[in-house]
Image: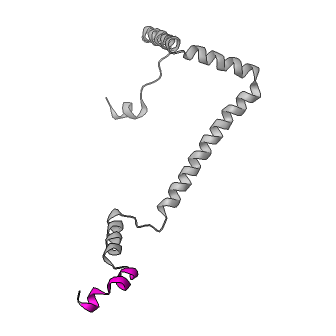
Amino acid sequence: MGIKKIILGEPMPDKNDPKYKQKYERDVEAGRKFANASGLGWLSGRITIFAKNHKEAFLFITFGTVILLFSLNIIGMVMSYRASHSNQPAQSVQRVDSAMRRQASPKASDIIRHGNPRLYGE
């Protein structure tokens, strides 16, 4: 396989080309069998009937779904961008170090109750 063939691919065969005609017919028949077995043929028929009878509602539902999903995608990207620019430490090592420093330093309430061990030699 040459580089040119990998990049450009093969030309799309014509369905009437005798070289590909049998393969095309087998693929079409397999697709029909799958659609009938899975109920996709019935579902697509019902959607077509609904679209013919309720054109505006069908367009509203279709484009509304597309706009909703696009908006959710944009919101997710904005939230991800904001989270990457927050003031939290970027690396897990920095988070562990800061947690260890907080744990090692005594709290003011501990010093008042028990005295400062550095001052009293306890």
**What main secondary structure does the magenta stretch of the protein show?**
helix
Q: Is residue 81 magenta?
A: no
Give the quarter of the figure containing the C terminus.
Answer: bottom left
Q: What is the tally of numbered marks visible in this picture?
A: 0
Q: Is residue 41 left or right of residue 11?
A: right
* Point 49% across, 65% down: residue: 86
Task: Choose between 45 and 118: the one closer to the eye.
Answer: 118
- Is the residue 101 above or below the residue 93 in the image? below
Residue at x 54% of width, y 15% of height:
39
**Residue at the far bottom in the pictured view:** 119
Q: How is the image coloured?
A: one colour
Q: Quadrant location of residue 63? A: top right
Which sits in the foreground, 74 or 105? Answer: 105
Is 91 situated above or below 22? below
- For the N terminus, the image quarter is top left
Q: Position of residue 80 (x, y in %)?
A: 50, 55
Residue at 40%, 67% (x, y): give it: 89
Residue 90 lies, in percent from the top left, at 40, 64
Q: Position of residue 52 (x, y in %)?
A: 73, 19
Q: Quadrant of residue 103?
A: bottom left
Q: Residue at x 32, y 66 (%)?
A: 96
Query: In this view, which residue lies farthest toward the front?
Result: 113
Q: Nearer the viewer, residue 22 or 34?
A: 34
The residue segment tinted magenta is 108-120
Q: Position of residue 115 (x, y in %)?
A: 32, 87
